[in-house]
Image (cartoon, rainbow, N blue to C red):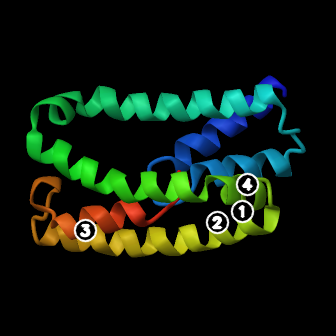
């Protein structure tokens, strides 16, 4: 993998990590389009840049994550379905979904659809002053269920 390819993958990660689409799927698709072989190094690189995105969130919101018990509890509720689905479906996702260009393109299509819907929900949440602290518990659980592979 060249430096330019690494930069392109990092940009793809940066653009897709914080929207409700699979950043992993987009990395696989981008690597496929760029004809980058899925070597152990490339897989490690993808994990490293995803870890960087997660650490950016932790750095930005560390006080809320550590000291606001409501936020922490709601984050845990959102995490549960993702963890369960990921654990149960790991083999299937790894074997069938990751690396399959058609599946990745379908994820891209549905990701854009979800992003448009999320945008409408965010506008509604802003209009109703809905914040993470007063979000309904059911919404956290459903939000965590939205994407079984991050």
* Mark toward the viewer: 2 or 3: 3
Q: Are marks 2 and 4 in contact (CB under 8 Å)?
A: no
State the CA–CA distance, disc 2 to disc 3.
23 Å
* Mark toward the viewer: 1 or 4: 4
**Viewed as shown, does residue 115 lie left or right of 32?**
left
Which label was assigned to residue 98? 4
The residue labelled by disc 1 is 104
The residue labelled by disc 2 is 108
Residue depicted at x 17% and y 47%? 73
State the CA–CA distance, disc 1 to disc 3.
26 Å
The residue labelled by disc 3 is 139
| Number of other residues with Cα within 10 Å of mark 4, as a class: few under 14, some 14 to 19, many 20 or more | some
Q: Earlier in the sequence, mark 3 or mark 4?
A: 4
| Number of other residues with Cα within 10 Å of mark 1, as a class: few under 14, some 14 to 19, many 20 or more | many
Residue nearest the observer in this picture, 80 or 42: 80
Q: Earlier in the sequence, mark 2 or mark 4?
A: 4
Residue depicted at x 73% and y 33%? 43
State the CA–CA distance, disc 2 to disc 1.
6 Å
Q: Are marks 2 and 3 in contact (CB under 8 Å)?
A: no
| Number of other residues with Cα within 10 Å of mark 3, as a class: few under 14, some 14 to 19, many 20 or more | few
Q: Secondary structure at mark 4?
A: loop
Q: Are marks 1 and 4 in contact (CB under 8 Å)?
A: no
Q: Earlier in the sequence, mark 1 or mark 3?
A: 1
Q: Secondary structure at mark 1?
A: helix
């Amino acid at each position: 993998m060249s430096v330019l390819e690494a930069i392109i993958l990092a940009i793809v990660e940066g653009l897709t990590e914080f929207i409700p689409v699979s950043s992993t799927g987009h990395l696989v698709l981008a690597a496929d389009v760029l004809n980058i072989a899925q070597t152990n190094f490339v897989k490690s690189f993808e994990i490293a840049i995803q870890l960087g995105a997660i650490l950016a969130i932790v750095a930005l919101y560390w006080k809320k994550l550590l000291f606001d018990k409501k936020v922490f509890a709601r984050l845990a509720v959102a995490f549960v379905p993702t963890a369960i689905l990921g654990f149960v479906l790991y083999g299937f996702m790894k074997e069938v979904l990751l690396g399959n260009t058609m599946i990745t393109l379908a994820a891209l299509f549905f990701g854009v659809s979800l992003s448009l819907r999320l945008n409408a929900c965010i506008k509604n949440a802003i209009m109703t002053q809905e914040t993470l602290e007063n979000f309904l518990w059911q919404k956290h659980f459903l939000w965590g269920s939205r994407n079984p592979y991050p």
